[in-house]
Image (spheres, rainbow, N blue to C red):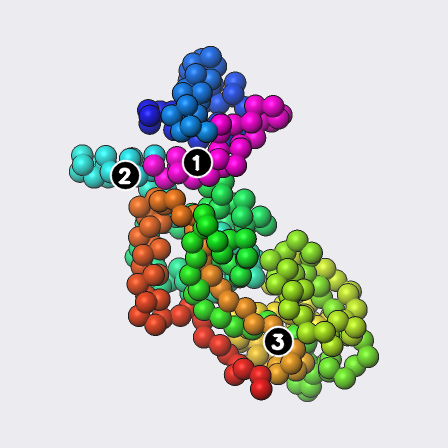
């Protein structure tokens, strides 16, 4: 298998067009097509579905994309070390995370592992499985995703906490909303967001009839800002509102019953990652083995 075939394939994955990919690789389209067919023969799988416009990757092609990218990066870094010359630029470790975990949780994680990777590129993605399968990210920081908790993916738990149903307070520090109210203005997550899927799966039944949606977005930070302005109640992860809970500017309606536990997990594809991503993964794995957690529960379990 020629390393150039892998490079050709990665360009094709990006551009999804044979003529444009051939032009980008500075070779003729017939020669480029032969390279891709030779690669498919070597792999023993059809990687590209040529019947679609633009072309698409087969399931095997999506999985092989991750492997091809990691192999080319390892080859490039390995040759640079053998030649004892620094690479012009190391590709960053690409960590994807939903809005609700980009700050401050992700910042805490980056501070902890900053020596394990030369650079980290933070991506926000709506389609986690596709991002990992198609090699758009090396690692995904997210909540429990059942489809990623099985092969060909690996994961470990970094910590845990609770989504709390919270509301703002008035000038005297009194709650604007109470659980006894017949209706509560509800700041709802968009149906396709990470938070919505987790919350809908575990939302306490008594809360369902009281919540009347008045606003919808996928952005956790925007829900927090709206709640602080007294616009309604929202399910927010305690890792995002620790300061507000301490100051009393956000108040849980009922932390004993209106709470939804979550775990934060780091996911990866089981295929070998780039050297920098593997170092980051191993660093976290060693810390977890020693008993470290990124998050500790802020509230005791409800009795």
Eyeballing the image, is 224 above or below 129?
below
Magenta run includes residue 30: no
Label 1 and label 2: CA atoms lie apart by: 20 Å
Q: Which residues are magenta?
A: 46-71
Q: According to the image, label 3 marks what residue?
A: 259
* Residue 241: quarter of image: bottom right
Q: Position of residue 275 (x, y in %)?
A: 31, 46
Asked whether the residues under the numbered discs 3 and 2 touch, taking CB atoms below 8 Å apart as contact, a structural biologist would say no
Q: Which mark is residue 64?
A: 1
* The quadrant where residue 248 appears: bottom right
Residue name at image x 52 percent, y 27 percent: 48
Mark 3 and mark 1: Cα distance apart in space: 41 Å
Instruction: State left or right for residue 102 relative to residue 204.
Output: left
Closest to the observer, 14 or 111: 14
The label nearer to you, 1 versus 2, is 1
What is the secondary structure assignment of the residue under circle 2? Answer: helix
Q: Which residue is labeled 2 in the image?
A: 77
Q: Is residue 76 left or right of residue 67?
A: left
């Amino acid at each position: 298998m020629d390393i150039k075939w892998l490079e050709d394939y990665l360009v094709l994955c990006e551009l999804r067009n044979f003529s444009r990919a051939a032009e980008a690789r500075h070779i003729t389209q017939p020669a480029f097509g032969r390279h891709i067919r030779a690669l498919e023969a070597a792999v023993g799988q059809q990687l590209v579905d040529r019947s679609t416009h633009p072309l698409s990757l087969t399931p095997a092609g999506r999985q092989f994309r991750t492997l091809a990218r990691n192999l080319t990066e390892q080859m490039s870094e390995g040759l640079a070390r053998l030649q004892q010359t620094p690479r012009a630029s190391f590709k960053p470790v690409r960590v994807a995370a939903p809005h609700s975990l980009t700050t401050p949780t992700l910042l805490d994680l980056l501070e902890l592992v900053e020596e394990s990777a030369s650079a980290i590129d933070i991506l926000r993605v709506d389609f986690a499985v596709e991002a990992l399968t198609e090699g758009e990210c090396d690692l995904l920081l997210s909540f429990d995703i059942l489809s990623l908790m099985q092969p060909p993916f690996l994961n470990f738990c970094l910590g845990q906490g609770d989504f709390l149903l919270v509301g703002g307070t008035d000038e005297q520090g009194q709650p604007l909303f109470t659980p006894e109210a017949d209706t509560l203005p509800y700041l709802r997550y968009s149906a396709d967001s990470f938070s919505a899927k987790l919350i809908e799966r575990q939302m306490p039944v008594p809360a369902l009839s009281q919540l009347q949606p008045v606003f919808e977005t996928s952005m956790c930070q925007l829900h927090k800002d709206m709640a602080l302005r007294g616009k309604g109640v929202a399910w927010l992860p305690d890792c995002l509102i620790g300061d507000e809970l301490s100051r009393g500017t956000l108040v849980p309606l009922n932390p004993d019953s209106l709470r939804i536990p979550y775990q934060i997990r780091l996911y990866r594809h089981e295929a070998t990652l780039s050297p920098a991503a593997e170092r980051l993964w191993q660093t976290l794995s060693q810390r977890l083995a020693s008993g470290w957690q990124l998050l500790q529960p802020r509230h005791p379990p409800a009795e």
